[in-house]
């Protein structure tokens, strides 16, 4: 039995989002694994493509992992020459991380797989509905970031 919203007897939105996340995560894990990276490594490469030069601490916040966990991810990517780290010019203890050309190649292949996954997921939706879903999901995520739980 699906968890229901007691006021409407409809599936809870949280349940539907969780169900989608589980299925999407499974497909993403399989897809990126076929390109030699984990989902967290793919996320890290994607973030660095958009925001070059971030520290491990900054990457950790964006990937929802601890700085220690992100350091392990970045170290693994660095060993495989998918990223490189260099010292921050003003803060010598901070290492800035950048995607290498090899990392961009892997990222391009992963992006193609991600396009296929999203195409499958959204195939029966109109472009207008897709934009509405994108907007609603971003709004919901932001609302939860700002809300203070009462418990």
Image (cartoon, grey):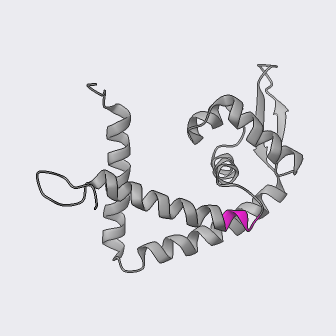
Q: Is residue 94 above or below residue 20?
A: above
Q: Residue at x 76, y 37 (%)?
A: 72
Q: In the shown orientation, is residue 137 left or right of residue 75?
A: left
Farthest residue, direction front: 1
Q: Is residue 55 visible?
A: no
Q: Residue at x 57, y 34 (%)?
A: 61
Q: Residue at x 32, y 51 (%)?
A: 14
Where residue 36 sits in the image (x, y, percent)?
A: 78, 61
Q: Is residue 78 visible?
A: yes
The part of the chain drawn in magenta is 31-35
Where residue 109 sits in the image (x, y, percent)?
A: 71, 69
Check the picture and name the quadrant holding the C terminus. Answer: top left
Where residue 1 sits in the image (x, y, percent)?
A: 28, 62
Please name the predominant secondary structure of the magenta segment in the image: helix
Farthest residue, direction left: 7
How many numbered marks are there? Answer: 0
Q: In the shown orientation, is residue 147 left or right of residue 18?
A: left
Q: Residue at x 42, y 79 (%)?
A: 123
Q: Is residue 150 magenta?
A: no
Where residue 150 sits in the image (x, y, percent)?
A: 26, 25
Q: Is residue 107 above or below residue 61?
A: below
Q: In the shown orientation, is residue 80 left or right of residue 57?
A: right
């Amino acid at each position: 039995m699906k968890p229901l919203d007691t006021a409407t007897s409809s599936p809870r939105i949280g349940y539907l989002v969780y169900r989608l996340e589980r299925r999407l995560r499974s497909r993403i894990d399989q897809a990126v694994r076929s390109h030699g990276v984990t989902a967290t490594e793919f996320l890290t490469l994607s973030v660095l493509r958009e925001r070059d030069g971030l520290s491990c601490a900054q990457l950790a916040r964006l990937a929802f992992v601890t700085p220690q966990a992100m350091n392990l991810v970045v170290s693994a990517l660095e060993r495989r020459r998918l990223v490189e780290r260099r010292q921050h010019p003003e803060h010598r203890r901070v290492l800035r991380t950048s995607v290498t050309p090899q990392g961009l190649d892997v990222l391009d292949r992963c992006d193609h797989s991600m396009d296929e996954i999203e195409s499958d997921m959204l195939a029966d939706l109109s472009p207008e509905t897709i934009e509405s879903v994108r907007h609603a999901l971003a709004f919901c995520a932001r609302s939860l970031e700002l809300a203070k739980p009462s418990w």
